[in-house]
Amino acid sequence: MANSSSPSGGKRRFLLAATSVVGGIGAVAVAVPFVRSMTPSARARAAGAPVEVDISKVEPGMMITVEWRGQPVWIVHRTAEMLANIPKMNDRVADPESSQPLQPAYVNKENRAIKPDYLVLVGICSHLGCSPTEKLKIGADSGLGDDWLGGFYCPCHGSKFDVAGRVLKGMPAPVNLKVPPYTFLSDSRILIGQDKS
Ligand code: FES
């Protein structure tokens, strides 16, 4: 556990989070026939529905990926070290104060989260739509150089993003990664795709 919770540790564990469509489709075994029985408009509504995610088992340093509207959404439980590294990146990222409207107004403009510990991001590159890979390890172990402070790397054309999803200066990607609308239902449950209101 200690290794996986350290951003510079050797192992990083990933979980595919169990998600459920709000409104209660229920277990997977019954979800398919239920969805098939829907009208086209009901299916469209279900496909765009918010997704509820249990984050109780996402330990510090871990990242999970869930699906919302056919897109990967990452949830990263950031460590104190990750959070401390965000302001250190301010002079290396293109839009440190998130001036572009790529996140809801209620997230912090620097760490880009409602609760700093939990980063929620749409995992699609803002350049041409590839899915970046996590590079949460710090330093040379990341493969991105000694001065890498953790974040995400897009293998398609080499764009780099910090651990708040802010694009570094001079990258092919023009803007930061997108933060979806979300809200905390409790300390351990996030609803992705819907604001608190
Ligand atoms: S699609 Fe990510 S850098 Fe081009």
Image (spheres, rainbow, N blue to C red):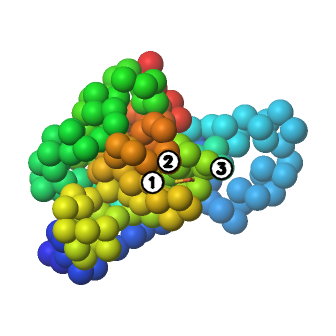
Q: Is residue 42 left or right of residue 196?
A: right
Tell me which numbered mark, 2 or 3, is placed earlier along the sequence: 3
Structural distance between the alpha carbons of marks 2 and 3: 24 Å
Q: Mark 1 = which residue?
A: 159
Disc 1 under 8 Å from ligand 1? The reply is yes
Q: Position of residue 118 (x, y in %)?
A: 29, 46
Structural distance between the alpha carbons of marks 2 and 1: 6 Å
Mark 2 or mark 3: which is in front?
A: 2
Q: Which of 133 and 47 is in front in this view?
A: 133
Within 10 Å of disc 2 (Cα), the crowding (few <14, some 14-19, many 20+) is: some
Q: In this view, does 142 lie to the left or right of 54?
A: left
Disc 2 under 8 Å from ligand 1? The reply is yes
Q: Where is residue 6 in the image (x, y as percent from the top left)?
A: 17, 69
Structural distance between the alpha carbons of marks 3 and 1: 22 Å
Q: Nearer the viewer, residue 11 or 133?
A: 133
Q: In this view, does 22 lie to the left or right of 14?
A: right
SS for dot 3: loop
Can residue 142 be spotted in the picture? Answer: yes
Q: Which of 77 and 54 is in front in this view?
A: 77
Q: Disc 3 residue type? A: Gly
Q: Mark 2 = which residue?
A: 172
Which of the numbered marks, if any, corresponds to residue 70? 3
CB under 8 Å between discs 2 and 1: yes
